[in-house]
Image: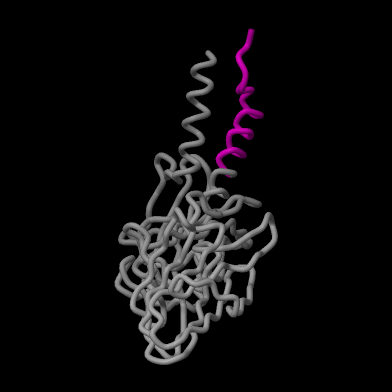
Amino acid sequence: MSTHKEYALIAILATIAVVGVVPAFAQWQMLPSGSSNPVSSENTPIPITVSTDKAVYDHNSIIMVSGHVRNPYPGQQLTLRVSDSSGSIVQVSQLTLDNNGNFGTKLTTASPLWTKSGVYTIFVQYGNQQGTSAKVQFTIPGGGATSCDPNQLAATLNDEVYCISYSINGGTVLSGTLNVASKTLIVNIQANDDGQITLNIPRSVLDSKNGNNDQSFVVLVDGEEKGTAIETTTSDTRTVIIPFTVGAGQIEIIGTQIVPEFGTITALVLAIAIISIIAVSAKTGLRFTPKY
């Protein structure tokens, strides 16, 4: 095989792994949202099924996923992928089948990547080439990608909306925006009295790091830096409590990382692509350097 053909094959394999293209001849079985008893129209066993325990969830729910694979191969795993209402991948998992071909898992909608409302899709695939696949959909209400729950700030960035949970006393939240250039979350408020706002900011939306260590956000209220903000952190979220005085109009939270172009899931998919290339190379003798 010529060098040019080798590199072309590598590019094709990487593209397939990154974008998650379904293998040729894959069998699709579309199930209704929340369906637990799929039935084949021809009364024949469906090669693979997947279902959820409900059709509608909120942003703090546990989703019970279950399914079955007909005639499974011993030791082979199943890939599960979840995408949000805009098609972005929010979770990728490998599931192990039991001896009867059944599988199951729990998903949480409270994950910081599950910020959007609308219709989500669970896609499962078993096998490699000519493998079978299926999908099921469920809804997280809120008006799609352009709205959030009443207790969430809809922070806009271009055409995207990121939902950030908050609480406020002494005022009202009017709007929120994200600025990539300054790595800032801007919250516009109407302060009718002295009060405070508490924001639960997903790290996937805005974070502040010094190397691998957390550092405090820089907080401005009407352009003046405030050192009275209180922060607590978890592995997924940073909670910041910001006091303000009557008449305040704008709060800025400045970090070091904001809505990354390549998130955690994208990096995972890219890693899968690289592993696939290495595996194919080992089996086929594919060369990565020209042969002289």
Q: How many marks?
A: 0
Q: In the picture, which quadrant includes the N terminus?
A: top right
x and y percentages locating residue 283 in the rendered image: 64, 29
Residue stretch in magenta: 272-292
The residue nearer to you, when weighing 254 against 152, is 254
x and y percentages locating residue 240 in the rendered image: 56, 77
Q: Is residue 119 shown above or below 130?
A: below
For residue 150, side relative to residue 79 (left or right): left
Say whether residue 47 is visible: no
Say whether residue 22 is visible: yes
Report the magenta stretch's main SS. Answer: helix
x and y percentages locating residue 36 in the rendered image: 42, 73
Q: Is residue 174 shown above or below 136?
A: below
Residue at 35%, 60% in the rendered image: 160
Q: Is residue 10 magenta?
A: no
Residue 59: quarter of image: bottom left
The residue nearer to you, when weighing 214 against 164, is 214
Residue at 36%, 83% in the rendered image: 190
Q: Is residue 156 shown above or below 77?
A: below
The residue nearer to you, when weighing 89 against 234, is 234
Q: Is residue 291 magenta?
A: yes
